[in-house]
Image (cartoon, grey):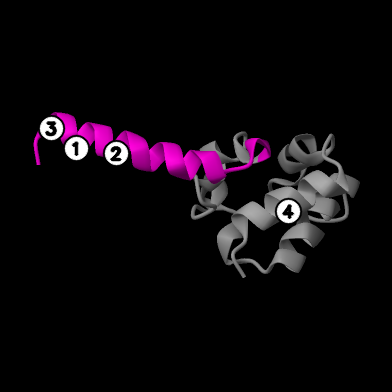
Amino acid sequence: MKPIVRTIAMAIIVGAVSAQATPLYTKCVACHGAEGEKAALGKSMIIKDMSKADFITAMKGYKDGSYGKDQKALMKAQVTALSDAQIEEIASFIVKK
C-alpha cells in the first residue's frame, strides 16, 4: 500500500473511532489509554476490564472520597465536577461488559 493511501486510510479509521468516543473521556486518555486498556501510572486497575457497575461505583466513590488508594486525591479532582449522568456516559463508552 502506498504511504499516502495508508495515511488516508488510518485517518479515516481514527476519525471513526474518535467519533464514537465521549468527549468526557478525553481527559482520561493520557493515563488510562484510548480504550481504557492501561493501568494508569502503572498503579490502577485496567478500567475496560471492570464491570459497568464496578466502574460507576469506583467513580462515585472517588467523587465522594470513599474509594481509592494511591491515586485517590488525583481521581477525586478528575471526577468532582461530573454528574451521575456523565459518569454513566463514560461507563457506557469505556466498559464493554
Question: In the displayed image of the protein, which residue is found farthest to the left?
Answer: 2
In terms of sequence position, does the residue under pointer 4 or pointer 2 come before the other? 2
53 versus 42 height, above or below: below
Q: Position of residue 82 (x, y in %)?
A: 82, 39
Dominant secondary structure (helix, strand or loop) of the stretch shown in magenta: helix
Residue drawn at 78 percent across, 35 percent down: 77
Location of mark 4 (residue): 69
Which region is colored magenta? 1-24
Q: Between marks 3 and 4, how big is the CA–CA gap? A: 46 Å
Q: Position of residue 55 (x, y in %)?
A: 72, 60
Location of mark 2 (residue): 10
- Mark identifier at residue 3: 3
Q: Are marks 1 and 2 in contact (CB under 8 Å)?
A: yes
Q: Are marks 1 and 3 in contact (CB under 8 Å)?
A: yes
| Quarter of the figure with residue 44 | bottom right
* In-image side of 25 versus 84 (left or right): left
Which one is in front in this view, the residue at disc 3 or the one at disc 4? 3
Q: Are marks 3 and 4 in contact (CB under 8 Å)?
A: no
Location of mark 1 (residue): 6
